[in-house]
């Protein structure tokens, strides 16, 4: 082939543009270097791209909205300067610094002896009926019509037995270490200086998430029942910058009430009470901060929460906060199950931290509990030295529960794809319940996801990164988000595609619980016909595991017992490739 013939071919193949049926036809010529008989020349080979449409990538505003709704945790908070100056004056004028610090350390030890002595355990649950694991002869007999009344009685008895277990556990733990603090003037000042910053940061972070994820929530009447004076009201005033119509604050002591009045003299429409009285009006926002521990027992806590719930207006929100210890988590776990078992799903929904209204997977591990942390700046050490002078930041651990009095997006829609707005979609996103593990070129994230799963996700740098694009149906195709995984904080929401590394996260959930949860998952999938909760890569990973051969043997051999290993939450078991040799074993 000569150079002249190549030039003539190039003149014939000129890039042209053709328009038909709203599509562009473009011929693109790429140079290719070839060698022939000691000469170098360039040949052009054409590649045709028939359809090039408009870009479907998300705009910068849409991506910013997704990140703003999902990344709700805050790094380090600072209390307002007005309140900081008042705390400084309070510490300087009324008590010596050494005596103040001694009282603060003494109360901290007393509270720690009550909050931090309980070890994590598998909590009794009303939603997990372990007696239904295998159908025996008695259950077959109860299926008959003549034993219908007896069957209903046994079901009620089983539910009550779980409640009895919760009451017994609560009584055993609460009677071990009881704390009673007499709030004298000096003790009240030390208690406020020791705990105000941490409690303010926790309430501020929770209210910040409520404001970001629920845009139509504008409370006008506030009730704050807090153990630390003025922390809840000041945090609410900083988040909702407008003026409240009415604020009711309940303080357990007269001296704490006087401190609260001093700290909130710049806030108007505040009514101070020492108890929660029977009043006709309702509240839009109720904050209960570290109050359940001061109540007497299990029944009194449930009755207290029910009374407060009745004072909540429609579409109102109640925030319950406790210490981030197994003790605080146990109390919130019983309150959460009380709502799920005694109320219908169209009457309430959980805003945070749970992405579902079902059994808590962390309560079944026996080694973990659901808690989070928030960092806040301390007071100056020359005013009040809480700990080491080298540390200017304190990290407060807490467990919390946010419940709204109306129907939620998880009740309206069956899946995330049906939700309309980004804020409604966020109710289906998994919650990061442990600090992320950042390793070389990959990140491990432990999440609590819908429905009732405690999973470990892996986000690798080498995985096929997908851009945020919108499909023809209008849904958002999300990538694996490696850059966001490096920045994600403990307590954030994971809005990207789930690539599951372990379906049971830390691999210590009891086997009985795993089998029961798997049956619940299959039942819900048949009832709602929902889509798979794992992606294609995870499904291929599960289908290739050798564990399925053991599962197949149990099914083909017809053994009555379930296999003693965790069954993965994959779409379905493919038993077709187990050939006739397995069936021959059965015939033999």
Image (cartoon, rainbow, N blue to C red):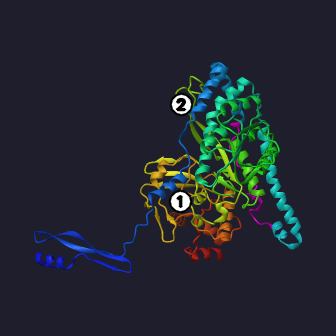
Image quadrant where one finds the N terminus? bottom left
Q: What is the x, y in percent for residue 574?
A: 57, 72
| Label 1 secondary element | loop
Which is nearer the eye, 83 or 512?
83
Q: Residues within 10 Å of mark 2 (few under 14, many from 20)?
A: some
| Pointer 1 residue | 498
Q: Identify the residue at horizontal 73%, vertical 45% (top origin).
A: 331
Seen in the picture, residue 39 relative to 429 is either above or below; the reply is below
Disc ID at residue 392:
2
Q: What is the x, y in percent for residue 490?
A: 56, 46
Q: Quadrant of residue 130?
A: bottom right
Specify the segment rendered in magenta.
115-136
Asked whether residue 578 appears in the rendered view, the answer is yes
Seen in the picture, residue 447 relative to 472 is either above or below; the reply is above
Q: Residues within 10 Å of mark 1 (few under 14, many from 20)?
A: many
Q: Identify the residue at horizontal 56%, vertical 73% (top origin).
A: 578
How far is disc 1 from disc 2 in space, using C-alphas? Answer: 37 Å
Q: Is residue 130 magenta?
A: yes
Q: From the viewer's perspective, is 586 left or right of 171?
A: left
Q: What is the x, y in percent for residue 92?
A: 62, 21
Q: What is the x, y in percent for residue 506?
A: 59, 51
Seen in the picture, residue 169 relative to 498 is either above or below; the reply is above
Q: Identify the residue at horizontal 64%, vertical 47% (top origin).
A: 370
Q: Earlier in the sequence, mark 1 or mark 2?
A: 2
Image quadrant where one finds the C terminus? bottom right
Q: Identify the residue at horizontal 51%, vertical 51% (top origin).
A: 444
Camera-near label (1 vs 2) is 2
């Amino acid at each position: 082939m000569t150079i002249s013939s190549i030039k003539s071919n190039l003149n014939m193949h000129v890039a042209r543009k053709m328009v038909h049926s709203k599509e562009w036809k473009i011929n693109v010529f790429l140079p290719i270097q070839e060698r022939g008989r000691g000469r170098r020349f360039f040949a052009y080979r054409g590649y045709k791209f028939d359809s090039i449409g408009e870009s479907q990538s998300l705009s910068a505003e849409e991506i910013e909205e997704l990140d703003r709704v999902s990344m709700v945790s805050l790094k380090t908070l600072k209390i307002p300067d007005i309140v900081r100056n008042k705390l400084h004056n309070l510490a300087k004028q009324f008590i010596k610094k050494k005596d103040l610090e001694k009282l603060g350390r003494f109360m901290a030890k007393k509270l720690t002896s009550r909050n931090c002595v309980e070890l994590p355990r598998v909590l009794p649950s009303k939603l997990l009926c372990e007696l239904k694991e295998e159908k025996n002869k008695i259950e077959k007999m109860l299926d008959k019509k003549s034993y219908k009344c007896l069957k209903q009685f046994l079901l009620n008895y089983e539910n009550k037995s779980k409640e009895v277990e919760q009451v017994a556990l609560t009584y055993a733990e609460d009677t071990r270490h009881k704390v009673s603090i007499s709030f004298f003037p000096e003790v009240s000042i030390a208690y406020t200086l020791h705990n105000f910053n941490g409690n303010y940061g926790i309430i501020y972070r929770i209210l910040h998430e409520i404001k970001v994820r629920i845009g139509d929530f504008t409370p006008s009447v506030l009730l704050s029942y807090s153990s630390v004076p003025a922390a809840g009201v000041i945090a609410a005033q900083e988040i909702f910058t407008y003026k409240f119509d009415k604020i009711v604050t309940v303080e357990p002591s007269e001296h704490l009430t006087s401190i609260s009045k001093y700290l909130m003299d710049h806030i108007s429409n505040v009514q101070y009470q020492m108890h929660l009285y029977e009043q006709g009006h309702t509240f839009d926002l109720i904050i209960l901060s570290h109050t359940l521990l001061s109540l007497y027992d299990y029944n009194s806590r449930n009755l207290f929460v029910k009374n407060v719930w009745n004072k909540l207006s429609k579409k109102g929100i109640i925030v319950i906060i406790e210490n981030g210890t197994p003790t605080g988590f146990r109390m919130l776990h019983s309150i959460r199950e009380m709502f799920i078992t005694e109320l219908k799903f169209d009457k309430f929904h959980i805003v945070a931290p749970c992405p579902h209204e079902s059994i808590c997977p962390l309560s079944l591990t026996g080694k973990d509990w659901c808690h989070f942390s928030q960092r806040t700046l301390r007071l100056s050490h020359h005013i009040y030295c809480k700990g080491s002078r080298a540390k200017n930041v304190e990290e407060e651990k807490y467990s919390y529960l946010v419940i709204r009095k109306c129907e939620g997006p998880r009740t309206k829609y069956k899946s995330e794809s049906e939700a309309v707005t980004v804020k409604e979609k966020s109710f289906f996103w998994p919650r990061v319940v442990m600090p992320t593990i950042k390793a070389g070129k990959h990140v491990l994230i432990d999440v609590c996801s819908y429905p009732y799963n405690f999973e470990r996700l892996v986000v690798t740098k080498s995985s096929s990164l997908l851009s945020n694009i919108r499909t023809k149906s209008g849904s958002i195709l999300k990538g694996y988000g490696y850059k966001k995984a490096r920045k994600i904080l403990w307590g954030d929401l994971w809005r990207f595609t789930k690539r599951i590394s372990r379906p049971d996260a830390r691999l210590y959930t009891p086997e009985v619980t795993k089998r029961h949860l798997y049956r619940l998952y299959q039942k819900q999938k048949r009832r709602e016909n929902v889509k798979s909760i794992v992606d294609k890569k995870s499904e291929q990973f599960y289908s290739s595991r050798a564990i399925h051969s053991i599962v197949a043997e149990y099914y083909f051999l017809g053994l009555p017992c379930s296999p003693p290993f965790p069954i993965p939450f994959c779409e379905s078991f493919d038993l077709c490739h187990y050939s006739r040799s397995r069936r021959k074993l059965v015939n033999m």
